[in-house]
Image (tube, rainbow, N blue to C red):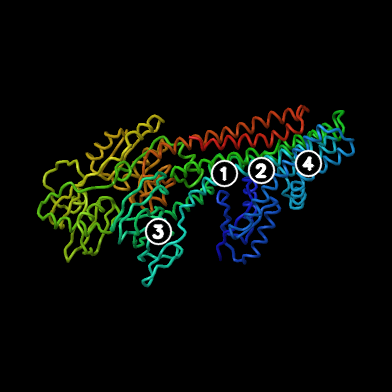
Amino acid sequence: MDKYIFHLRGLTCANCAGKIEEELKSKDELKNLHYDFLNDELVFESEEDSIELKRKIQDIVDSIEDGVIVTEDIGEEIEEEEEEENFSIYKAILVFIGLVALHFVNLNEKFKLISYLILYIIIGYDVIKASISKISSGNFMDEKFLMTVASLAAIISGEYAEAVAVMLFYSVGEIIQDRAVDSSKKSIREALKLKPDFANLRLNGEIVKVDPSEVSIGQVILIRPGEKVPLDGKIIKGSSNLDTSNISGEFAPVSLEAGDEIISGFVNLDSSLEVEVTKTYKEGTIAKIIDMVKNASVNKAKVEKFITRFAKIYTPIVIGLAVILFLFLNFATDHTAKEALYRAAIFLVISCPCALAISVPLTIFAGIGSLSRRSIFVKGGNSIEALTDIDGIAFDKTGTVTKGEFTIAEVEEVSGSRDEILEIASVGEAYSTHPIAKAIVKAFETNKTPDHLNNLGGKGIEFDLEGKSYLVGNKKLMEDFNIKLDGDKESNYVDVFVADKEKVLGIIKLKDQIKDGVKESVDELHKRGVKTYMFSGDKDRVVEEIAKEVGIDYYKGSLLPEDKVSEIKKIEKDKRIAFVGDGTNDAPSLASAYLGISMGSGSDIAIETSDIVLLKNDISSIVRGIDIAKRVKKIAYQNIFIALFLKVVVLGLGAVGYVSMPLAVFADVGVALLCIVNSLRVFKE
């Protein structure tokens, strides 16, 4: 079974996109199908060949939304699409000038009728054609059909200018709506520019330009000045300054040299670098972020799901009411059939749920785009909604509240020498990604490798070196192996014990620093009514000191990964909390919390498990994210109120004859545009 990615060029209607996806999912030959409206990607699996699939999908799309072209190549039809949009604008201008001219020029009735009909055909031909073509498929009940019925009813009633105006207003509304959707999508697509175009692979003594996905772990790539870093790796030759703004959102050059790790997405500024690849493209940082952005529209917020369900109920009800209104006016009052038809047509135009169908998804898209502009990536609208619901935030300490850039303050020699202690610890920690391990490895370089390495989660490691067994870890690890510790005094440092299973050889004491701006961010969270927690595997005394300094409400140290999960579950008995972490050991907590938030510099599993990724590695992004999420939710509900309130009012007036056809069109197109403009306020600071 092959995987396919098709594109639906020209599809800007979120409501139509939902109908197309639902219809395609009902086809047995299309497996695991979903349509990503944001990135225009129809992804599915099938055993049939590409040409036949394309034909079948095109037929289904045509039955729901005319003018949409199914393609495999994202570049197909773009020029034609742009020309078509420009042509629509020219047509609208021409018809508007014609309407104004006919209003002021005195012509005989016959010539005026012909002129109005010509204008009507120019502006309404595509809409009428699409409506008629859909009748046979049964999917005709959409806004184009309603506009066709309304304008024809106006012509039958002798209101020729109104018929042209209906089509003109609708066409202009469609143009503005398409531009608004494209603008919202564009803000999200900016994140996809992070994707590297190529990698310079060193192969048999030559440099070959290849696709990043073709490079394997262990191969060496060359990154020249001005080029984007295509893959995660370790610098083996050279030093340079790199622009991190693609990742962090701010221009903050960092200096890296041989031995330093480098992540994809950075831009090399100064000198060439040779990098040994440590992750394939699919496993790299940028690939994971791009995948998150691409799938953001799949995970819908509750308000989006509500609108989808509501539209299915709402539309048939108002259509039924329009039929009842026609029958009542025609048979129970002194209205003529022509007048009753005109009044029912007005009612139908007002009833179109276009404002609801487009404005709420557009608000969510705008929210996702606004967050991504600030290097905050979410897995969907449900993550944005969850961000507004949290009562508290629990932080891991290392790498989240503190910089996670440990330095060795001192080495306490107990029964071994300084070099012996550091060498043993460096050998054992060589394969760990924890910041403490990295600091120890950096302090003492060795080519020796451990045997029978056993990672004892939350405590340390056990391994053999040159035929002898060693332990490197915290106080709990020593206690588990009944290794005697002298005294019981607490230290303000992070203590790493090195032992040979009989006695302690020494203690490596490390220190970490609190990140800039953490205290201010915690204060801002408190102002927003969010309670703060901190859970760490570090010593109670160290955790307490840091928590008090930054103003965290509740804290607890000496916790194993499973202990953190237990603490989260206790709190979530009556509260919803987000957990913020960056390490592999944080993955269980990220998964168990109501909302998981990981730092972009964190481990792969932490990023995969979380719902939100902060590429700036700064908890001030959480404050900004909460503010944007609350604005998104507020505007989404505002749009629901605006659309429903105005439609109910105008429907009532239309039923009793106080609404003209142009006002009915405004109740549909105008209200939709009001909601769209309101949605775009999400981008405002």
Question: Which one is in front in this view, the residue at disc 4 or the one at disc 1?
Answer: 1
Q: Which residue is mark 3?
A: 231
Question: Quick one: 575 or 601, which is closer to the camera?
Answer: 601
Q: Which residue is mark 2?
A: 175
Q: Residue at x 83, y 31 (%)?
A: 329
Q: Is residue 528 visible?
A: yes
The residue at which mark 1 appears reads as: 183
Dot 3 and dot 4 residues touching (CB under 8 Å): no
Q: Earlier in the sequence, mark 1 or mark 3?
A: 1
Residue contact between numbered discs 4 and 2, judged by CB atoms under 8 Å: no
Which amino acid is tagged 2? Ile
Name which of mark 3 and mark 2 comes first in the sequence.
2
Q: Earlier in the sequence, mark 1 or mark 2?
A: 2
**Looking at the image, which is closer to me, 496 or 98?**
98
Q: Residues within 10 Å of mark 1 (few under 14, many from 20)?
A: some
Residue neighbourhood size for the residue with mark 3, other residues' Cα within 10 Å, grouped as few (<14), some (14–19), many (≥20): many
Is residue 572 positioned above or below 428 on the image? above
* Classed neighbour count for the residue bearing mark 2: other residues with Cα under 10 Å, few (<14), some (14–19), many (≥20): some
Report whether 508 appears left or right of 13.
Answer: left
| Element under disc 2 | helix
Give how far across and how far down residue 207 sits, in percent. Answer: 40, 67
Above or below, comparing residue 264 to residue 517 in the picture: below
Q: Residues within 10 Å of mark 4 (few under 14, many from 20)?
A: many
The residue at which mark 4 appears reads as: 149
Separation of residues labelled 4 and 2 (CA atoms): 21 Å
Which amino acid type is shown beneath numbered disc 4? Val
User: How far apart are labels 1 and 2 at the CA level?
Assistant: 12 Å
Which amino acid type is marked by label 1? Ser
- The N terminus lies in quadrant: bottom right
Q: Position of residue 682 (x, y in %)?
A: 52, 37
Do the residues bearing badges 1 and 3 touch, measured as CB atoms within 8 Å? no
